[in-house]
Amino acid sequence: MSSNEKEAAAPFLDARISTAVCPIQTIAIKSQQVANEKPKLDKQASSVTGISIVSSAWLFESVSSKKCKKESEYLWSTLNKTQAAATSAANGTADATAASNPRRSARNSQAQAQSQTQPQPQPQPQHQTKSQAKAPKKNNKRALDSTTGGTITDTAQADTEPPAKKKKETKAETQRKIDIPVDSGFSNRQNYHVYVDPDGLIYDAALNQTNRMNNNNKFYFIQILEPNDMSGQYTTWMRWGRVGEFGQSSFYKDQSLEAAISTFGKKFKDKSGLSWKNRFDSPKAGKYMFLERDYEVESEDEKEEKVKKEDEEEEEVDVKMAECTLSEPIQHVVSLIFNQSYWANAMATLDYDANKLPLGKLSKRTLQKGFELLKDLSDMVNNGQFHGTALEIINNQYFTVIPHALGRGRIPLINNERMIKKEIALLEALTDMEIANEILKGSKKSDAADPIHPLDQQFAGLGLQEMTPLDPEGTEYRQLEDYLIKTHGDTHYIKYNLKYIFRIERKDENDRFLNSPYANIKNSNRRLLWHGSRTTNYGGILSQGLRIAPPEAPVTGYMFGKGVYFADISSKSANYCCHHNSGNTGLLLLCDVELGDPMLELTHSDYHAGDRAKDENKLATLGMGRTVPYGWRDAGSVHEDLAGVLMPDTTEAPRSCDDGQNRSLYYNEYIVYDVAQIRIKYLFCVGMS
């Protein structure tokens, strides 16, 4: 068709001309809105030679793939009418609306149409075979994905926006694919997805209620499920029970969208006391609380890779695994850090219910709220309030926000320092495991043409400048091994089996120190000290460094205030490795720490030590122990970079210090309150029993 013919045809079809997608083709795009308003458009188009009428999905996927798609696969006349209607309804009726970000339940979105009579329960959907379950995917790739929350302009509006702006908005729409899992209790979940409205509002509600006095610790899940074949028959799914158990379930099947939304809204208000649009309001007394979930975002490449992977599995295609380029010692440690079984062990030990809010679904706001509630509990306990209604209310809120799997046992009352410390350890572990989970997720992406081994990708995700295994026969290794073995406390029963030592340098950590006020202080006092933590925490530690507890965390859980803690006795730090949760293997750090001289020296715990040290212009606190190193020597003999740094003299065993100061600690503890004072130098992989 000539350019003159195009210009003549455009007003005839009530359309505008655009060359932004396929400049050499003549294609008309029809949304459902246009189809409703202009039912004779197909006949008009057929009278104009060379024009194809396609669904808005053609434009969406052409822009998404940066490649002009074949219009024959998207012809409105051949596309299933129901599918086309669902496609265009989700994307074409909000033509002037910018795409919203659905990552966190689309907080600013409003619920759509409500009311209609309550449907009656129907029999549960039947299972489908694997081939049947996957059959709709080929059609679905043509249909516009209703979970994007995106918009597509119709024929009459295609050029109302400048091309540059249009292109930018469309790209944003195509990249914001979200992964919303259908509840595991729904047996036919492979054939359904969670419904997301055109504004990006996700119809997925996780509710929790904890009441210690009534021994309530229960959940309630509600989802609107849309079939993958886009048949227009929706299911409202509900599952409820005690946290940590499967519970019971019920559902309404073969509903219209309006009926499903109405059912969802009624159930949500019945359980929470709030309307769906007000779900973020303060929870109602005696009702369930809405738990905010963080939904993972999939790019188009990730989604296509997932479909490709499923197709390959279906065809039983053998894909050759790329060879790992890491040395065996590094492979061992990376596998240890990203071992998901160990993550599960850690969460189970801390009584966390990973089924309710699994890793990858925990929002930062949820963790922050958990810290804030612990701080409130800590303040009450410090003020002598160990029981009472106010404490019970905050306690219930904490266990509601941070779900715990406690079986049929009664919910504990957090009213002492030991319990507060345990919950702080849980929130800190969850924070680090969230970071590690992001790295792990990234390692699952691989280019088929240039595959990379997952361990290589996981290691790259740590962002280390250096990780060098030391030669067990070398002087550096042997001196460090002495420091580990010969500073074992008499009161500790851990036995060591040293596997590997690595020289470590975190990216930018050295520059951070050299550019800090601590680089050239006159009263320098740098020491090579131990730090221990769960193996599950090292994804966060190695990628982001040792960190100080957030402001919202209670100070009560830290003996000498919120800082980073170190020791000069290896077994003191090894006790924090929780090796029984990680195959009887622990990871220990040796760090170059600037302590300044003098330190704030204390014989008993003081939660306000950080403030006291700052007031006295001191850089660190020393919790003075009854057992101390025999002496100190220059660590430059271990490695030249450590010249001027002190480490314990291990030629003699640690000695008892009886100076009449009534020291409450068995061993020294060193605490710094600025992470710029720390440089990680070595990582030890140690068998522990």
Image: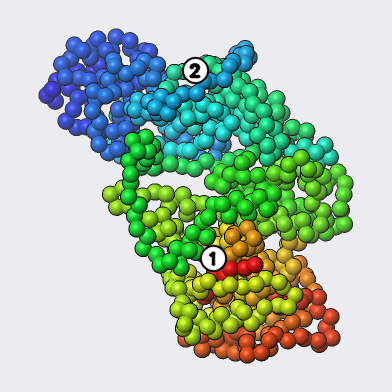
The residue under the point 30% across, 27% down is 58
Give x and y (percent) for residue 229. 42, 22
Report which residue position mark 1 lands on. Answer: 545
Give x and y (percent) for residue 152. 37, 28
The dot on residue 520 is none
Mark 1 surroundings within 10 Å by alpha-carbon count, few (fewer than 14), some (14 through 19), many (20 or more): some
Between 234 and 355, which is closer to the camera in this rendering?
A: 355
The residue under the point 32% across, 41% down is 317
The residue under the point 48% across, 27% down is 192
On-image quarter of the C terminus: bottom right
Report which residue position mark 2 lands on. Answer: 233
In the rendered image of this protein, does residue 316 appear above or below residue 556? above
Dot 1 or dot 2, earlier in sequence: 2
On-image quarter of the N terminus: top left
Question: Is label 1 in contact with label 2 (beta carbons under 8 Å)?
Answer: no
Confirm whether residue 37 shows in the render: yes
